[in-house]
Image (cartoon, rainbow, N blue to C red):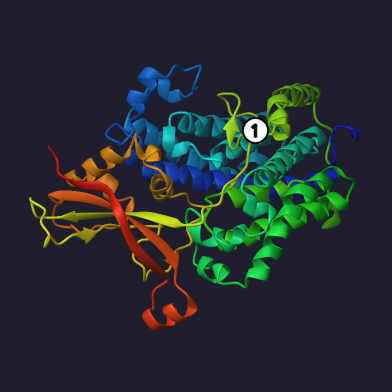
């Protein structure tokens, strides 16, 4: 007999879609780790893992790389995680017994936790913790052998609520432009990594920008409350969140943040509204006990994040435990009015003079060439491009990694050059590197038609004077 208070077959389809979609996000995350780690945190990277684990104890950052690290072992973990995510995406979790399925999801979570906990600055983004928290709960969702546990579905809604409500509160408590509905006059232009439609979003009429901002407040502060109401209202609320997130996907590049929020919203949809669910057996006793224990643990760990939501000094994107089990989220408490970009240039001349010819490096995602239309990379995460945006806000964000980055460009390091979109020195590294800070803005419609450029830029100052290897 089914434990109607504990599990519900009505969410069979929701669980199926949620698990497949979460596996797809995991796949993207592991691919990004596998393809970028050597230059960022590898043995010869800008912030090497071996150096990090020497000074940070295991209890502060649990990771398999405390026991052993080599670039080959890291690659094995990253590509292994990608392969496991692909298998779960294909339905491996439903083709094995319940206990084995849980182990597969747990291994996936543990592998990515190990990467995040040694990723340092490069993995300091809120969506890393969001993927880990979501992935942890996915371990206890079960598979086709049992009806989805209602308690875990509730915890997923609680997570989605914190993501949306936290983002809404940080805006109201932060920049005044959110309260006077003018933030989107600037956001599409100054966001970390604009997408191919960002220029068009920025050029929408200002009254429409005000409507966008007001709609954002409704979507993040009112709609999430409805997630805890009876069906079909909760499903409708989840649908509104999905629509809002797709709008954000179209207007910018935020790695897998928006896509993972959509995945969470799908877990709140009553699948029986779409198709008649099969009658699934009640969970075994051991599974029910485990779910009850995990629910109690998450509720206890939720105390600090809940207090943070209510605090006037609300923090964004903070983890309260080294396992990233329950975290706090939020974004864009402050919106920049001006966009600045760091442009890195090199020269083959050993001594710089007024006539020196400097050639510009191109990045994959961040603005550089003013005629280049911004690309769509999300849900893939270009970590170096994102950190370059932070560095342009303040040199403090680049203190630990920018000098090693420049050194590797001067050495012609292949792994570092693979992170870039264009290397102006294909035959050998330059003799000198410099970095200059530019002010960027989107061109007007008239400027776009006259010049073909998407951006207009003006030099402001040196970020790094001409530098050579010692």
Name which residue lies at 80% across and 33% down.
151
Image vertical order of residue 55 relative to residue 418, above or below: above
Taking the image as shown, residue 222 lies to the left or right of residue 66, namely right
- In which quadrant of the rendered image does the C terminus lie? top left
Name which residue lies at 27% across and 34% down.
44
Find residue 300 and report its horizontal and vertical position in percent.
73, 22
| Tag 1 residue | 313
Residue in the foreground of this view, choosing between 227 and 148: 227
The crowding category of the residue bearing disc 1, from other C-alpha atoms within 10 Å (few below 14, some 14 to 19, many at least 20), is few
Please, what secondary structure does the residue beneath circle 1 have?
Answer: loop
Find residue 440 and report its horizontal and vertical position in percent.
40, 62
Find residue 397 and report its horizontal and vertical position in percent.
40, 39
Residue in the foreground of this view, choosing between 470 and 228: 470
- In which quadrant of the rendered image does the N terminus lie? top right
Image vertical order of residue 260 relative to residue 148, above or below: below
Q: Image quadrant of residue 37?
A: top left
Q: How many marks?
A: 1
Q: Image quadrant of residue 8?
A: top right
Name which residue lies at 75% across and 35% down.
155
Asked whether residue 177 appears in the rendered view, the answer is: yes
């Amino acid at each position: 007999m089914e434990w109607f208070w504990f599990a519900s077959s009505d969410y069979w389809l929701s669980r199926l879609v949620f698990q497949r979609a979460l596996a797809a996000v995991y796949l993207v995350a592991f691919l990004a780790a596998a393809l970028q780690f050597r230059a960022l945190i590898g043995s010869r990277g800008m912030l090497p893992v071996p150096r990090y684990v020497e000074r940070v104890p295991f209890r502060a950052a649990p990771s398999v790389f405390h026991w052993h690290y080599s670039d080959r072992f890291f690659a094995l973990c990253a590509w292994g995680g990608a392969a496991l995510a692909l298998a779960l995406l294909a339905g491996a979790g439903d083709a094995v017994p319940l206990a084995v399925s849980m182990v597969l999801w747990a291994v996936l979570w543990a592998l990515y936790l190990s990467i995040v906990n040694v990723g340092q600055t490069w993995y300091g983004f809120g969506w890393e913790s969001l993927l880990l928290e979501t992935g942890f709960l996915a371990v206890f969702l079960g598979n086709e052998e049992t009806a989805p546990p209602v308690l875990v579905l509730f915890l997923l809604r609680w997570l989605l609520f914190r993501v949306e409500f936290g983002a809404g509160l940080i805006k109201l408590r932060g920049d005044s432009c959110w309260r006077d509905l003018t933030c989107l006059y600037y956001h599409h232009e100054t966001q970390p990594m604009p997408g191919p439609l960002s220029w068009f979003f920025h050029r929408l009429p200002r009254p429409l920008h005000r409507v966008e901002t007001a709609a954002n407040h409704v979507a993040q502060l009112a709609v999430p409350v409805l997630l805890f109401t009876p069906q079909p209202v909760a499903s409708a609320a989840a649908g509104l969140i999905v629509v809002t997130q797709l709008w954000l996907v179209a207007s910018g590049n935020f790695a897998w943040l928006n896509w993972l929020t959509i995945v969470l919203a799908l877990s709140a949809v009553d699948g029986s509204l779409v198709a008649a669910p099969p009658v699934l057996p009640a969970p075994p006793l051991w599974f029910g006990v485990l779910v009850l224990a995990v629910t109690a643990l998450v509720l206890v760990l939720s105390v600090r994040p809940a207090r943070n939501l209510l605090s006037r000094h609300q923090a964004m994107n903070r983890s309260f435990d080294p396992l990233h089990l329950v975290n706090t989220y939020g974004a864009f408490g402050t919106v920049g009015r001006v966009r600045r970009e760091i442009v890195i240039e090199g020269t083959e001349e050993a001594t710089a003079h007024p006539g020196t010819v400097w050639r510009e490096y191109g990045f994959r995602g961040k603005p550089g060439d003013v005629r280049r239309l911004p690309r769509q990379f999300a849900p893939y995460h270009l970590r170096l491009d994102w950190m370059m945006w932070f560095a342009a806000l303040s040199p403090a964000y680049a203190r630990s990694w920018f000098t090693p980055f420049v050194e590797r460009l001067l050495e012609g390091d292949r792994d570092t050059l693979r992170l870039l979109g264009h290397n102006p020195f294909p035959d050998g590294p330059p003799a000198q590197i410099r970095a200059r800070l530019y002010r960027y803005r989107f061109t007007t419609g008239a400027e776009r038609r006259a010049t073909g450029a998407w951006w207009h830029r003006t030099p402001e100052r040196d970020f790094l004077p001409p530098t050579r290897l010692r």
